[in-house]
Image (spheres, rainbow, N blue to C red):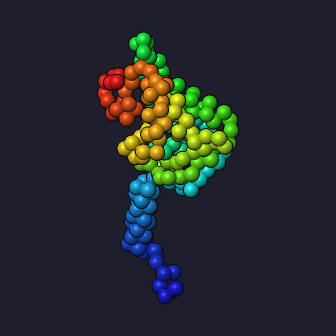
Amino acid sequence: MPGRFARLGRTPTERALLLVAGALVAFAIGRWTAWQGSSSGPVQVVPESISGTPLVLDGDTLDFNGLRVRLFGIDAFERDQLCARADGSRYGCGQVARETLMVAIARAPVTCVRRDVDQYGRMVAVCRTRDDDLAARVVAEGSALAYRKYSNDYVDEEDVARQARRGVWSGRFEAPWDYRHSGERKDVR
């Protein structure tokens, strides 16, 4: 058999067949890679947990040196989202949500334990500092809502914030999931 393969590619027809076969293999590998990952880069392995001092991207998303982690069970207001105070004046509730998460972390080490991986390849995790469950803290401050579509873990914190009229609960707002999907981007509550 080794002699048989050593002769392969000597004729023009064999060379053409080898080129076509190589192109088909390269195409198949490219399609498989695109199917497995996103257009933003190679497939990323999502670990079971991660620890460190993350960058806070918004009220429910952290970045650990390129690994994006979304806080499990909550939905924070979008970075550009505006809400209304009781007097009707508008403010950047999305920016307040980000600042609330930054204050909760306060440069302390954060440990996140994976619960899921979302459609964007982000780790969805319960993240804690030594003292706080970060998602619970952001919801309790009125800067995020319990994401009841996926979990009831932070409903109690949301109820306490609502009753105390903390954060967005002191005025009017559009739920973050509605804000992302609405074309008008208006207040609803």
Residue at 62% across / 47% down in the picture? 111
Residue sticking out furthest to the right: 108
Residue sticking out furthest to the bottom: 1
Q: Position of residue 15 (x, y in %)?
A: 43, 70
Vertically, is 158 above or below 185? below
Q: Position of residue 144 (x, y in %)?
A: 47, 33
Instruction: Give the position of the C terminus as an image quadrant.
Output: top left
Q: Position of residue 163 (x, y in %)?
A: 44, 28
Vertically, is 66 above or below 80? below
Q: Nearer the viewer, residue 158 or 168?
A: 158
Task: Specify whether 121 is left or right of 112.
Answer: left
Q: Nearer the viewer, residue 160 or 54?
A: 160
Q: Nearer the viewer, residue 182 or 37?
A: 182
Rendered image quadrant of residue 84? top left
Rendered image quadrant of residue 68? top right
Q: Judge whether residue 61 can be spotted in this image.
A: no
Residue sticking out furthest to the left: 183
Vertically, is 97 above or below 71? above
Q: Judge whether residue 179 can be spotted in this image.
A: yes
Rendered image quadrant of residue 180? top left
Q: Position of residue 148 (x, y in %)?
A: 39, 42
Q: Nearer the viewer, residue 25 or 58?
A: 58
Vertically, is 90 above or below 73? above
Residue at 46% across / 24% down in the picture? 165
Residue at 60% across / 44% down in the picture? 128
Residue at 38% across / 31% down in the picture? 175
